[in-house]
Image (cartoon, grey):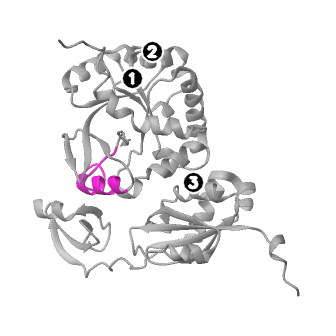
Amino acid sequence: MTVADTCIHPYPAGDSSLRRMAVEAGELGFDTIVVPDGTPLISSGVRVIPAALIAEESVRAVSGQIKKRGNGQSLVMVNAGENGFNRAVLNLKGVHVLRNLHLTRKQSFDHICARLAADRGVAVDLDFYPVIHTTGRTRQRVLVRFGELIRIYSRYRFPLTLSSNARSVLDLRSVEEITLLCSLFGMEEDDVEAALSTVGDLLNPPGPVRVVP
Amino acid sequence: MKPLPPTLRTKKRYILAEIEPPGAGADQKDLYHAIANAVTSLFGDVRAAAISPAVISSGPDYVIVRCARGGEQDLRIALSTVTAVGDVRIVLRPRATSGTLYALRRRLPQERPAEPEQPQEVHFRGRLYDARRYQGQKVDVIEKGIKRQELLFLTQDDLEVV
């Protein structure tokens, strides 16, 4: 079973090299890490999956970026926006993850988006960076938003992914710590396990059963 | 004064946490303030009072924190939100929880990790750094200079490739 941190930023975006990140992630219980604009490789026993982070404001631009950067080996992650944008993005072929929902308004991800995400197998990413690194009202907003997403998730069961968005080895957290942090907004341990193993299924979705003669 | 009988004393729990990077030079008092602030910020004054975190002892790479029984899970969550002690960036990784200090001290690694070797000068991406090597592949390099020294976390392979 895959145990993945869905987004980390090694050097030069951060202060730790990819190899060091892989060593530390392996020690913390992960076997897969997702790196924006990386190359697929295995380092220190940890699988590195490249990702294409798309931060566009129009659906047309997102579609263009998917055509340009989605190569079948990369995880395509799109920054969320308003409700209409999210619905359109969830309908696009080639999108794997919708991220940064904590930066959007409450109505941006409703039951229709949830059903779409569940039907099309698009994951919703929960980013732990603001939970760990911010305090006060900012963190409270993020926790409330994650709580709302988990409430919708418990009904529609769309795929979830968990990411640390670490820019340093000091930002990485262990699987156990992430499980504890998830309890802050009411996410059950089984759901955390499922969310950590989602990345493996996103790139290789289960297809229909075929009878091979 | 007669001491309280054991059945009436508040039950405690002790958490052993590893400090990374080792030898970051975090003072015990600063550690206490960082942990107390993290607990208060995350759970509020009322819950922080119930948890009652206190730093019992610390070393270059570990800290033992005491809390009231029932507060250990919340304290572990709060420990994972500690990102700095004073001006020093660190991370506290909870390793074990116990009801007695004796049991927890037995879980401390018997062999202390080797102290980092004397810093060596290395070149990385055209700049001069002091490198400290730790166990295994890990190498921390800090830029030589007076101000705005860049700290990087690398491996031996990274330096060899460069």
Quadrant housing residue B112 = bottom left
x then y, percent, for residue B11 = 74, 67
- CA distance separating discs 2 and 3: 33 Å
- CA distance separating discs 2 and 1: 8 Å
From the image, tell me which residue sits under label 2: A116
The amino acid beneath tag 1 is: Val
| Chain identifier of the residue bearing label 2 in the image | A
Alpha-carbon neighbours of circle 2 within 10 Å: few (<14), some, or many (≥20)? Answer: some
Up-down: is A45 above or below B62? Answer: above
Specify whether A113 is left or right of A106: left
The amino acid beneath tag 3 is: Ile
Alpha-carbon neighbours of circle 1 within 10 Å: few (<14), some, or many (≥20)? Answer: many
Q: Which mark is residue B146?
A: none
Q: Residue at x 33, y 28 (%)?
A: A202
From the image, tell me which residue sits under label 3: B77
| Chain identifier of the residue bearing label 3 in the image | B
Q: Let me know if marks 2 and 3 both belong to one chain.
A: no
Whether residue A176 appears in this view of the structure is yes
2 and 1 marks in contact (CB < 8 Å): yes
